[in-house]
Amino acid sequence: MPLDQTALLAELEPVVATNLDRHLALAKEWFPHEYVPWSEGRTFDGLLGGEPWRPDDSKLPDVARTALIVNLLTEDNLPSYHHEIATLFGRDGAWGTWVHRWTAEEGRHGVAIRDYLTVTRGVDPVELERARMDHMQSGYVNVHGHEVLHSIAYVAFQELATRISHRNTGRATGDPIAEQLLARVAADENLHMVFYRNLLTAAFELAPDQAMRAVANVTADFRMPGAGIAGFGRKAILIALAGIYDLRQHRDEVLAPVLRQWNVWDRTDLRGDGERAREELAAQMSELETQAARFEEKREVRRRRHGES
Ligand SMILES: [Fe+2]
Ligand SMILES: [Fe+2]
């Protein structure tokens, strides 16, 4: 008999407790204010009569600006994410402690990136604030919001995707201060990924067919949490063209290593629907390979045409 959602939460609670301790031992305290060059700041127009933002205030390359906006708006939607995981995982015991701890750590990311962008005049602050209002008012809904294992699989992939996106965005800024800040944020995302990845490892031991089904379904309809941002499709293409986050990275640096950790290809404990789910996943991975190769070819042609190396 498959385990129901309540049983899954109860069975995984000791694993949450162990991994929470592990997380707390590894997580380093850090302070957003130390990462921001405050002396570069200038008062803006409006109430205080300073200078309005102008495009040439920003020293950031266009694509780094786009990626920073997407990453920040994604972090900004934290109230929705908190709602989704608190509703599913609960606010009691080890699950609840994790939910709140994770939320507090994520809150630091948005604060740090916003302070950096505002002080350095990296993006138009009016446009950014309007985009934040727009994005948060749409909210975020986890499409697998009632399924524990699907949600854990999703966040394991998503935290790693976010890690890579922050790290590569940092490099794309050409600013050592931004790079340092985003590397720090990326290190947090990595620990989050490890936490969720370990939970699903335990779920594979507990209920291999259900875990495998969850992974195949989540991989099939994976969308970044920021997919609801206005103009996301166009922004995502620019980000992919710049190699900050593209299908190749999604397949080879996010999905493949996590799937390997779960030993999905060599498991001998799958039956029935678990076996079918693994076959579906294999087909998805090869389809992603085709799409990633096609995108890389197109990008290469485009680069040559634009005389880029
Ligand atoms: Fe974050
Ligand atoms: Fe995270």
Image (spheres, rainbow, N blue to C red):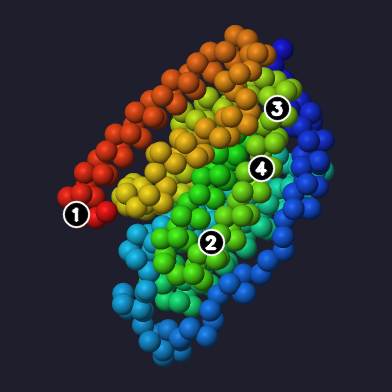
User: Which labelled disc corresponds to residue 203?
Assistant: 3
CA separation in Å, label 3 and label 1: 49 Å
Q: CA distance from mark 1 to mark 4?
A: 40 Å
Residue placed under numbered mark 4 in the picture: 194
Q: Which one is closest to the eye, mark 1 or mark 2?
A: 1
What's the residue at 63%, 54% (across, down)? 188
Disc 1 residue type? His
Quadrant of residue 4 within the rendered picture: top right
Marked residue nearer the N-terminal end (3 or 1) = 3
The answer to whether residue 231 is left or right of residue 159 is: left
Q: Which residue is mark 2?
A: 182
**Most extreme residue toward the left, as rendered?**
305
Secondary structure, mark 4, is helix
Q: How many marks?
A: 4
For numbered disc 2, what is the local secondary structure? helix
What is the quadrant of the C terminus in the image? bottom left
Amino acid residing under circle 3: Ala
Task: Please tell me which residue is depicted at 51% across the width and 39% down the height of the picture.
Answer: 254
